[in-house]
Each structure stands twice: as C-alpha cells, then as structure tokens.
Image (cartoon, grey):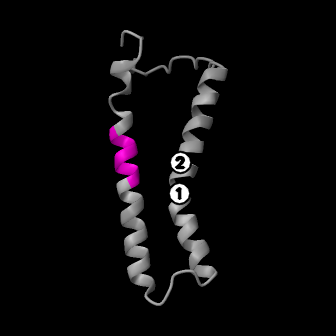
C-alpha cells in the first residue's frame, strides 16, 4: 500500500469585516496622498511650470517633499506612547 497524502478539506474564507475594509481604504488613501508630489511634478512638467532649469526644480521639489515626509513620519512615531491604550 502506498502512502498517499490526503489534502485537508478547504476551510471557507471568513468574510472581510468592515474594520478590515476600512483599514484597506485608509492605507489606499495614504498611498494616494504620498503620490501627491509626483502628480504635482507631472502637472508642472506638462504645464511649463518647471522653470528655466527643470532638473534643479525637480531636485529641490523632491528634496522638500522628502523632508516633509521625514518630519511627518518622525512626528507620528511617538503617538502610541501618548495614547490611552495599553499596547
């Protein structure tokens, strides 16, 4: 007699809760907001808003947004310690 592996019966997938769906929506919104600098640069590029030296403009604009995102990230980091929830 051969040893044959029998697959376990497939469990039904649990329905996604509203909390999970709202979390996915929030993450999607944050991702879209993080793409705002790229959209603004594209807008400026298509509407002649980059100035006489476009490479310099793009370099400065991306550097400014990098610093903004860094400050936002660093300011969000200590928020859990200020919240009233235990963990």
Q: Position of residue 7 (x, y in %)?
A: 50, 21
Task: Give the residue number, with chain letter if any, for mark 2.
Answer: 31
Q: Badge 1 local density, few (<14 within 10 Å), some, or many (20+)?
A: few
Give the residue displayed 36% in from the left and 65% down from the top.
Answer: 63
Assess whether residue 77 is covered by the magenta stretch.
no
- In front here: 15 or 9? 15
Q: CA distance from mark 2 to mark 1?
A: 6 Å
**Mark 1: secondary structure:** loop
Q: Is residue 73 magenta?
A: yes
Please give the name of the residue rendered at 51% of the width and 17% of the height, measured from the top-left corner: 8
Where residue 28 sits in the image (x, y, percent)? 58, 43
- The residue pinned by badge 1 equals 35
Circles 2, 1 touching at the beta carbon (< 8 Å)? yes
Report which quarter residue 80 is drawn in: top left
Callout 2: few (<14), some (14-19), or many (20+) C-alpha neighbours within 10 Å? few
**Can you tell which quarter of the image residue 2 is in?**
top left
Image-based side of 13 in relation to 79, left or right: right
View extreme (bottom): residue: 52
Instruction: Please tell me whether the stretch drawn in magenta is mainly helix, strand or loop.
Output: helix
Q: Secondary structure at mark 2?
A: helix
Q: Which residues are magenta?
A: 68-74
| Depicted 18 relative to depicted 64: above or below | above
User: Residue 77's x, y, as percent?
Assistant: 34, 33
Name which residue lies at 52% across and 65% down. 38
Which residue is painted at 59% across and 17% down in the image?
A: 11
Q: Could you say where residue 84 lies in the image, as x and y percent from the top left?
A: 42, 11
């Amino acid at each position: 007699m051969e040893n044959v592996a029998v697959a376990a019966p497939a469990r039904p997938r649990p329905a996604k809760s509203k909390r999970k769906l709202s979390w996915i929506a929030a993450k999607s919104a944050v991702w879209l907001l993080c793409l705002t600098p790229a959209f603004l640069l594209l807008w400026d590029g298509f509407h002649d808003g980059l100035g006489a030296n476009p490479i310099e403009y793009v370099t400065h604009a991306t550097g400014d947004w990098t610093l903004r995102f860094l400050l936002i990230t660093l300011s969000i980091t200590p928020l859990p310690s200020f919240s009233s929830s235990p963990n």
